[in-house]
Image (cartoon, rainbow, N blue to C red):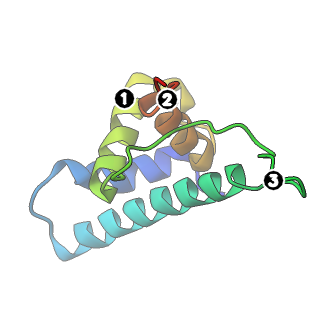
Amino acid sequence: MLKSESLLSYCQVAKKTVWTDNEMIQLQFCNGYIQGISDAIQLNEAMVDAHGRLLHKQTFCLPDDGISTTEAALVYLKYMDAHPEELHEEASVTVWNALTDAYRCTAKPK
């Protein structure tokens, strides 16, 4: 399992606007990992029972037009800067924490 401190080291290059070839590989790994975790969480939360009821409560709500992979990486970096005590955690957990913190679901007005 990937630790948060490792993912954080890959994602640091998201703060830049121009990358070397090696930094581009790091950024692609960061973006791909975060996107994969986000997709897996959303897929799991979309599972329904035989009666069409959701099996899991939705934990984060991305904007209707989504977010870019770079924005997701920057959200992750901001979260980890604020929560260095989580560096030892599994990266999948801290990605979930970061997305949940940044994109809390709110009740839509009727």
Element assignment for label 3: loop
Q: Earlier in the sequence, mark 3 or mark 1?
A: 3
Residue position marked by numbered label 1 in the rendering? 81
The residue that label 2 is drawn on is 104
Which amino acid type is marked by label 1? Answer: Asp
Q: Is 19 rendered above or below residue 21? A: above
The three-letter amino acid code for the residue at tag 2 is: Arg
Camera-side residue of 34 and 8: 34
Residue 55, given in percent of the width and then of the height, sits at: 81, 46
In the image, 95: left or right of 50?
left
Residue assigned mark 3: 52
Number of numbered markers = 3
Q: CA distance from mark 2 to mark 1?
A: 19 Å
Q: Residue at x 19, y 47 (%)?
A: 15
The disc label shown at residue 24, or none: none
Q: Nearer the viewer, residue 26 or 34?
A: 34
- Between disc 2 and disc 1, the foreground one is 2
Q: Residue at x 34, y 69 (%)?
A: 28
Q: Are marks 2 and 1 in contact (CB under 8 Å)?
A: no
Judging from the image, what secondary structure is the residue with disc 1 in? helix
Q: Residue at x 56, y 60 (%)?
A: 39
Q: Report whether 64 appears left or right of 6.
A: left
Crowding near pointer 1: few (<14 within 10 Å), some, many (20+)? Answer: few
Q: Name which of mark 2 and mark 1 comes first in the sequence.
A: 1
